[in-house]
């Protein structure tokens, strides 16, 4: 958000702010003579038109636009590629279905930074315990808002409701991919095996 605000300020020569909820990250052709307010209206219109096309979607009906956008922002920050997004989304939806804490690192990072800067360190066990509405290790369910801008493709993945039995994952830096598991014991074993290789 702060990166986009700085960029828009260069173009429009005044402070411009567009919230996560108001746009979808995509490539747009706009009239350079329009104002920042015109741009904001244009982006909101594009977003609303997008969701209108999916108004009969079961997942959209279940969660509503706001929660779908929040879920998509979690997926956007956690996953590495298109296929990864499908599985991360399935884990989030599976956890929501059974009332399990989401435990999303990206949301805990947002709880610390507010999205205003990069956290240039690893999360600590102390970080995971902070009492904050965006710390999904502390709260149950979704955080109150989005943690990043989201792309239309990511929203389509959420609405596509990719099915899996996975409830856990971690990122394996050695092979640069997420490792998924159905249960906690399986997850712990895979995680311990990975840590032995570090």
Image: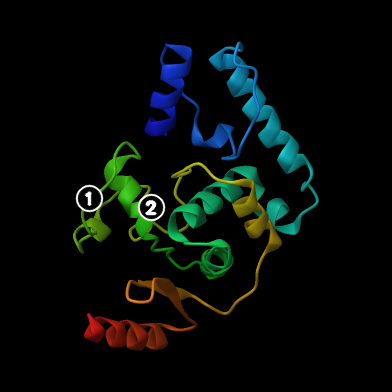
Viewer-nearest of discs 1 and 2: 1
**Res. 194 in view:** yes
Q: Nearer the viewer, residue 94 or 191?
A: 191
Picture coordinates of residue 132, whole percent (x, y): 31, 48
**Residue 2 in the figure: left or right of residue 146:** left
Is 136 rendered above or below residue 119?
Answer: below
Q: Is mark 1 on a helix, strand or loop?
A: loop
Q: Is mark 2 on a helix, strand or loop?
A: helix
All told, the count of numbered labels is 2
Residue named by callout 1: 120
Coloration of the structure image: rainbow
How crowded is the residue under tag 1: few (<14 C-alpha within 10 Å), some, or many (20+)? Answer: few
The quarter of the picture where residue 162 lies is bottom right
Quadrant placement of the C terminus = bottom left
Is 121 rendered above or below residue 173?
Answer: above
Picture coordinates of residue 173, whole percent (x, y): 33, 71
Q: Looking at the image, do the residues carrying marks 1 and 2 touch, with CB atoms under 8 Å apart?
A: no
Name the residue located 44 percent from the left edge and 63 percent from the top edge.
102
CA separation, marks 1 and 2? 15 Å
How crowded is the residue under tag 2: few (<14 C-alpha within 10 Å), some, or many (20+)? Answer: many
Residue named by callout 2: 107
Name the residue located 46 percent from the left edge and 43 percent from the top edge.
148
**Res. 16 in view:** no
**Residue 46 in the figure: left or right of residue 40:** right
Among the two numbered marks 1 and 2 on one chain, the one whose residue lies closer to the N terminus: 2
Picture coordinates of residue 123, whole percent (x, y): 24, 59
Picture coordinates of residue 131, whole percent (x, y): 27, 51
Quadrant placement of the N terminus = top left
The quarter of the picture where residue 32 lies is top right
């Amino acid at each position: 958000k702060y990166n986009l605000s700085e960029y828009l300020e260069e173009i429009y020569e005044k402070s411009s702010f567009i919230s996560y909820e108001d746009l979808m990250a995509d490539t747009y052709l706009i009239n350079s003579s329009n104002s920042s307010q015109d741009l904001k209206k244009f982006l909101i219109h594009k977003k609303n038109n997008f969701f209108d096309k999916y108004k009969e979607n079961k997942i959209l009906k279940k969660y509503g636009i706001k929660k779908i956008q929040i879920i998509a922002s979690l997926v956007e920050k956690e996953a590495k590629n298109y296929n990864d997004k499908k599985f991360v989304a399935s884990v989030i939806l599976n956890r929501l279905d059974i009332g399990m804490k989401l435990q999303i690192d990206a949301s805990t990072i947002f709880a610390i930074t507010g999205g205003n800067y990069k956290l240039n360190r690893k999360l600590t066990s102390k970080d995971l315990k902070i009492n904050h509405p965006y710390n999904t290790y502390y709260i149950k369910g979704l955080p109150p808002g989005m943690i990043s801008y989201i792309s239309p493709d990511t929203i389509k993945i959420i609405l596509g409701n990719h099915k899996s039995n996975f409830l856990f994952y971690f990122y394996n830096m050695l092979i640069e991919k997420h490792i998924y598991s159905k249960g906690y014991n399986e997850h712990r074993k895979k995680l311990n095996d990975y840590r032995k290789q570090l």
